[in-house]
Amino acid sequence: MDRRSVRHAGVLTCIPVTLVLVALLSLAAPAPAKAAGWEIQLQGQDTWVEHVSAVSDTDAWLIQDDPPKLMHTGDGQYWYDADNTGLTGDLDTVAFATSLVGCVLAHSGKVAYTTDGGATWDIVQTTCSSGEISFADSKNGWMGGLNPRGKLLHTTDGGATWEEQQFETPAANSVAGVAAVDAQTCWALVRTAAGPEVLRTTNAGVSWTHIAVPAPAEAFLCTIAASDAAHAWLGGGTNSSRLIVATADAGATWSTQLSASSGGYVESLDVLKDGLHAWAVAGDGVVFSTTDGGTTWGAQVSGVGTILLDVDFVDASTGWATGTSGVVLHTSDGGGPADKTPPVTTPSRRNGCWVNASNANLGFTATDAGGVGAWRIYYAVDGGPQSWGWAGGFTVTLASPPSDGAHKIKYHAVDKAGNEEQDRTFTLNVDTKPPVAGGLKKTTVKRGKYATIRFTVNDLPPCAGTAGANIVIARKGKLPSLVAGTPLKKAGKQTFRFKCKLKKGVYQVFVTGRDAAGNLSRKTLKSTLTVK
């Protein structure tokens, strides 16, 4: 959004006094209170906002991919086009070390750098593309990417020049992320044919230590963050869960801090220098945060369900997150409290209900009011293996043909935060045997009086022990004069009583038995009703 379109509709050469008074009152009025938790600043565009770089609570930069565009906010609220870098084509990343010093990397490998907060830019060609940049300070930073294999480049002059560094990894690799700590220390995440690997330097890249990562074989690691030479975090996921692993001893050992069987991969991590405050964004719109270095992670409500791609904080309170659908999120309170409330599952039927062979199924949906969103519902039928369905809704159908009797379905929902509902059990009763109707007698009634039609409906166990009937009364060869159904009640003797307003004559009466499961009697009873 062009800031001028929000703040300045145009230049007025003659301003009425009333407008001046309104302007003065506006200046005197207190600033509006900022929203708690995460607030949506931008959304709804058919573009990905892939990277964000935050400098202060008012100063941040981002890159969107379609069309490629650099955007800036100078007040922490409104974003405007700042695409005067001179770069063309796709943009890969943006990184600002201070309010004045920053770089933008294009897919072509060209880097635009500024030393005056984006007022002017210079361009330098590098040997890296499709990468990331991380600054330790206004002078020192690293770039990681590929072209065509993994590359690590280093700058000591704020991005004006870049020197390629050697790190001796297999040819089939890429540098997926870099995390600069200080002028001497940097971490990098490398993908190789053999799996993920971490590199670390403590001598400004003169040499790099190769560190194995004991992640699951199917793990895909997307991002790296570090607070010092000893502490680093990796984020990604497996086929069944999102994943955060961390080291506190320079990579000698790694521990799994988050392995929630819910939602998408961890796409980006950001850790403050204190090593305690950190945030992670995931592919299902969830933001995770920690204030104890990752001993505990809590899921925050972001307000969106789209893929979140990047996150960057300036302190324990202020940060931005970006993602698909043009999403830009902002928080001034660290993102708010963690969601600790489990979701709630709602079955489509009343517990203990009866069904027949044609409708022996049960629907489920789950909601997570005020939370990060329900994810899956896990269930097991009659003590069998556990299966799952999406929380938005699905149907469990019993094996065909279903056996008569009670079937127990144990179920619980899980939300995107990993909160689990307590196991609940639903009893679905199956009755496949039709009821038996009989005992229908001829009936005579005077017009205007009450007629009582008597019959019996019995049901064979297992059953609910209740029955009713569908009744049709019609002249022979004519359309029905009356169609009715009797309510379910104790099986056995049944009656249908109604005030007879039918014309005088002889009517045919048809009675079909019906049980609680919806089965109909195989035989429809026939008799007559004579109206005098």
Image (cartoon, rainbow, N blue to C red):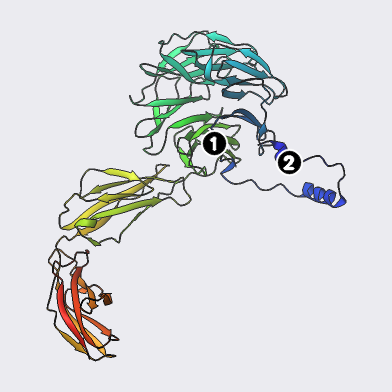
Q: Which of the 4 image quadrants contains residue 132?
A: top right
Give residue 414's position: percent from left, percent from top. 37, 45
Give residue 96's position: percent from left, percent from top. 63, 24
Label 2 and label 1: CA atoms lie apart by 24 Å
Q: What amino acid is at disc 1?
A: Asp
Q: Name the quarter where the C terminus is drawn.
A: bottom left
Q: Is residue 523 toward the left or the right of residue 264 in the image? A: left
Give residue 419's position: percent from left, percent from top. 39, 45
Residue displayed at 30% across by 44% down: 388
46 lies above or below 96: below
279 lies above or below 100: below
What residue is shown with label 2? 7
Under circle 2, the secondary element is helix
What mark, if any, has residue 60 been given in the picture? none
Residue displayed at 69% across by 33% down: 74
Q: Name the quarter where the N terminus is drawn.
A: top right
Q: Between residues 303 and 37, which one lies in front from this camera angle?
A: 303
Q: Residue furthest front?
A: 477
Under circle 1, the secondary element is loop
179 lies above or below 351: above
Q: Is residue 139 toward the left or the right of residue 483 in the image? A: right
What mark, if any, has residue 46 been given in the picture? 1
* First in residue order: circle 2 vs circle 1: 2
Q: What amino acid is at disc 2?
A: Arg
Q: Which of the 4 image quadrants contains residue 81?
A: top right
Q: Between residues 216 and 185, which one lies in front from this camera angle?
A: 216
